[in-house]
Image (cartoon, coloured by chain):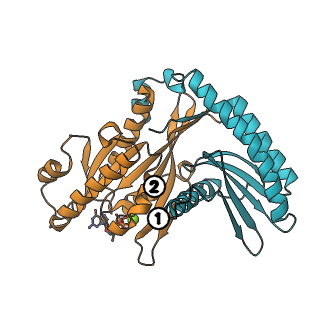
Amino acid sequence: MSFINYSSREINCKIVYYGPGLCGKTTNLQYIYAKTNPEAKGKMISLETETERTLFFDFLPLSLGEIRGFKTRFHLYTVPGQVFYDASRKLILKGVDGVVFVADSQVERLDANIESLENLRENLEEQGYDLDKLPYVVQYNKRDLPTAVDAGYLREALNPTNVPDFEAVATTGMGVFDTLKAVAKQVLIELKRGR
Amino acid sequence: MNSQLVLFEEEQKKIVQICDALHRDACAKAVFLVNRDGQMLANSGQTVQMDTTSLASLTAGNIAATGGLAQLLGEKEFAIQFHEGERDNIHISLVGQRVILVIIFDERSSLGLVRLRVRRASNELVKVLEQINAKAAQNPGHTVFDEISDEDIDNLFG
Ligand SMILES: Nc1nc2c(ncn2[C@@H]2O[C@H](COP(=O)(O)OP(=O)(O)OP(=O)(O)O)[C@@H](O)[C@H]2O)c(=O)[nH]1
Ligand SMILES: [Mg+2]
């Protein structure tokens, strides 16, 4: 749920990174955090297990600049990808304005990607959202790994509706900002269009 | 579908006044008002050294998790939470299902006093929230986005 504050002249939006366990959601946020000017970001919060798996969420507040005197603030969240954290994933999705689905390109994670994408759709529907009507982009991550599946094949399996999609290597940052910008732009356009 | 929250100067002022009064009357260190998505609406008191953005997001996460627990137990909501620390205590409550009121206080105040003052402030806040809803219903289309063009959005992303 976006929040527009005329008093402080701010537009606030929420973007959620979704995807199977270990696909690289947290790594996306870590890269964005590392490469953003101190003035444009807040503290990154990671609620994680002892083995650095996301337990509840990661959170990164980010300013992307001003439009007509209004500051644009994006709150980036990741969900925990492990299957049994589904209750937490539903909570994080509440009030979402835009979604990034991070897929793991490795051949052995193909089923996990498909399962996670179905889970995303279901959890959104439970809250009255339709993935096809939300600002939404797909990222094929871990392109650097030798077992990465051909991107065209991933597209067929994971992006049948042809939303903007990006190949990425979150550890080196390839594709990370392209993904973020694409979803942030869609969110603003959607806000302008009015729901 | 969620409706977006739009806060205008007039209501913002009222909210800040209520938070200021609560901060004073409850002898609190700080008072925050956060929406359920973790965005800060107002704060009052000693907030300068605090990471208010993180505080807002974690509070919202906390309320969301507690709400999930309540549902599992067949409760509608646990409307109030209280955490006691060695120095500081934190009192968290839901107001009008929509916003979260957070009070941080130490030994200069007490749980009883905080509870009492929170009740009064909540009643006042509910009224302002109703005003905000009414305003949104009156002119639903009007937002800053009327003045923002597609080009402006393009320019932001260079
Ligand atoms: N080789 C390679 N490794 C990556 C890439 N992106 C992430 N990783 C690694 O994959 C592992 C898991 O990354 P995370 O970002 O923690 O995964 P996650 O999606 O947040 O996982 P959960 O929190 O369990 O849902 C880490 O060891 C990362 O360094 C990538 O593009 N290439
Ligand atoms: Mg993670």
Q: Does label 2 lie on the same chain as label 1?
A: yes
Q: Farthest residue in the bottom direction?
A: A50
Three-letter code, disc 2: Ile
Tell me the tag on residue A151.
Answer: none
Chain ID, cyan in image: B
| Rendering coords of residue B46 (x, y %) | 78, 56
Q: Secondary structure at mark 2?
A: helix
User: Dot 2: few (<14), some (14–19), or many (≥20) neighbours within 10 Å?
Assistant: many
What is the CA distance from the residue labelled 1 to the residue labelled 2?
8 Å
> Residue A117 lies in what quarter of the image?
bottom left
**Residue A28 visible, this angle:** yes
State yes or no: discs 1 and 2 in contact (Cβ < 8 Å).
yes
Report the residue at 20% width, 46% height from top.
A159
- Residue identified by numbered label 1: A56
| Rendering coords of residue A187 (x, y %) | 41, 37
Q: Quadrant of the C terminus of chain A?
A: top left
**Residue A7 visible, this angle:** no
Label whose residue precedes the other's in the sequence (1 or 2)? 1
Q: Chain of mark 1?
A: A
Tell me the tag on residue A92.
Answer: 2
In this view of the protein, which residue sits in the foreground, B87 or A33?
Answer: B87
Q: Farthest residue in the front direction?
A: B74
Q: Secondary structure at mark 1?
A: strand
The picture's colour for chain A is orange
| Rendering coords of residue A32 (x, y %) | 42, 55
